Image (tube, grey):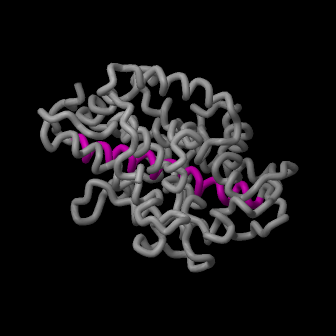
């Protein structure tokens, strides 16, 4: 539940007025003399101009990573800036949609953005659910988070040995996938592909249910409540973390059994929220308007907040008091 912060007062007042490549991916990282940064930078610049191909939505991923940057430890902040491509200019949030933007190039990465679970069971099980359409194990978003966490950690096992992984890509994949797993319909039902085959109307616009949760709830909120300024929405969520969710930060950050990354609980949360909020009252052909929007927006805001806090906590654990990365 939201506490009565300015963000929630605004929502309330508004409602009154509104009715193989997976474990050994191609290495084009820092060991190639910097040319990879040109490729990454150009790809980001070009693909940001193409609409409709992004994950949570560019705004959602940007929000998650911008929130995360505020919770990074000094060690993690230094390591992240060292790994980021030059085009990012030290800003993790600027490359958090990269994993969506290169899906046409890295075809193998497509299944790593989501998990398909059995229809209507409303639960998640790693051994049952984490595979691609060909049945290859570990090819899902929880497997990807664990894999790229291990890749980043491997750079510190022997600081004098060059890493065999592209750590720049590992950081960008990990940051993106922790965002993805917090979008409820990225852990959706198999039959409807996480809401992608459920055609609905968002007010007057024809779309699908997955796109509503990836993009349209956030876009509508930014336009209606924040003067079309995403930074204002991010600031409101940050205030809510500090105030309304302050007691939740430590539980959000924690991992059981001293794990570095713990994506399984995040996936279980998402499928539960998908059943309670995303799929509910969103039958094929339905029109989703004020009632759906205003009751689901707090869910989206909280998931963005959790994604940001948990991304930072994961990076803090990975880079805790570690020596400098050796990839020269």
In the image, residue 139 sits, relative to residue 21, either above or below, namely below
State the image coordinates of residue 305 (x, y, percent, origin top left): 48, 48
In the image, residue 29 sits, relative to residue 110, either above or below, namely above
User: Which residue shows up at 75% across the image and 66% down it?
Assistant: 282
Residue 263, located in which quarter of the rendered image?
Answer: bottom left
Using residue 17 as the reference point, say whether residue 250 is left or right of it: left
User: Which residue shows up at 22% across the image and 45% down it?
Assistant: 154
In the image, residue 77 sits, relative to residue 35, either above or below, namely below
User: Which residue shows up at 48% across the image and 27% down it?
Assistant: 40
Front-most of residues 315 and 23:
23
State the image coordinates of residue 192 (x, y, percent, origin top left): 68, 67
Residue 259, located in which quarter of the rendered image?
Answer: bottom left
Q: Quadrant of the N terminus?
A: bottom right
> Total of numbered circles in the picture?
0
Main SS class of the magenta portion in the image? helix
Q: Is residue 236 visible?
A: no
Residue 251, located in which quarter of the rendered image?
Answer: bottom left
Q: List the single residue furthest toward the bottom.
A: 121
Q: Which residues are magenta?
A: 291-319
Front-most of residues 37 and 205:
37
In the image, residue 292 sits, relative to residue 324, either above or below, namely below
Q: Is residue 286 visible?
A: yes
């Amino acid at each position: 539940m939201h506490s009565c912060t300015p963000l929630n007062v605004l929502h309330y007042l508004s409602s009154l007025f509104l009715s193989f490549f997976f474990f050994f991916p191609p290495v084009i990282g820092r060991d190639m003399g910097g040319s990879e940064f040109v490729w990454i930078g150009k790809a980001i610049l070009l693909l940001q101009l193409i609409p409709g191909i992004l994950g949570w939505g560019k705004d959602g991923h940007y929000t998650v990573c911008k929130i995360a940057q505020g919770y990074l430890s000094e060690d993690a902040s230094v390591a992240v800036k060292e790994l980021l491509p030059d085009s990012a200019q030290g800003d993790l949030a600027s490359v958090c949609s990269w994993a969506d933007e290169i899906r046409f190039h890295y075809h193998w990465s497509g299944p790593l953005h989501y998990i398909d679970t059995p229809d209507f069971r409303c639960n998640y099980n790693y051994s049952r659910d984490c595979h691609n359409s060909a049945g290859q194990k570990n090819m899902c978003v929880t497997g990807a988070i664990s894999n790229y966490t291990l890749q980043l950690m491997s750079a510190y096992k022997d600081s004098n040995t060059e890493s065999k992984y592209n750590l720049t890509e590992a950081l960008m994949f990990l940051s993106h996938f922790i965002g993805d797993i917090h979008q409820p319909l990225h852990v959706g039902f198999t039959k409807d592909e996480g809401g992608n085959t459920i055609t609905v109307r968002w007010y007057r616009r024809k779309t699908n249910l997955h796109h509503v949760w990836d993009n349209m709830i956030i876009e509508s909120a930014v336009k209606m409540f924040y003067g079309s300024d995403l930074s204002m929405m991010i600031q409101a969520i940050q205030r809510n973390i500090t105030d309304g969710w302050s007691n939740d930060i430590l539980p959000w950050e924690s991992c059981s059994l001293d794990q570095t990354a713990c994506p399984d609980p995040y996936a279980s949360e998402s499928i539960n929220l998908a059943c309670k909020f995303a799929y509910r009252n969103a039958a094929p052909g339905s029109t989703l308007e004020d009632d759906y929007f205003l009751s689901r927006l707090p869910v989206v805001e909280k998931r963005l907040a959790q994604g940001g806090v948990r991304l930072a906590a994961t990076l803090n654990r990975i880079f805790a008091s570690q020596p400098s990365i050796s990839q020269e």
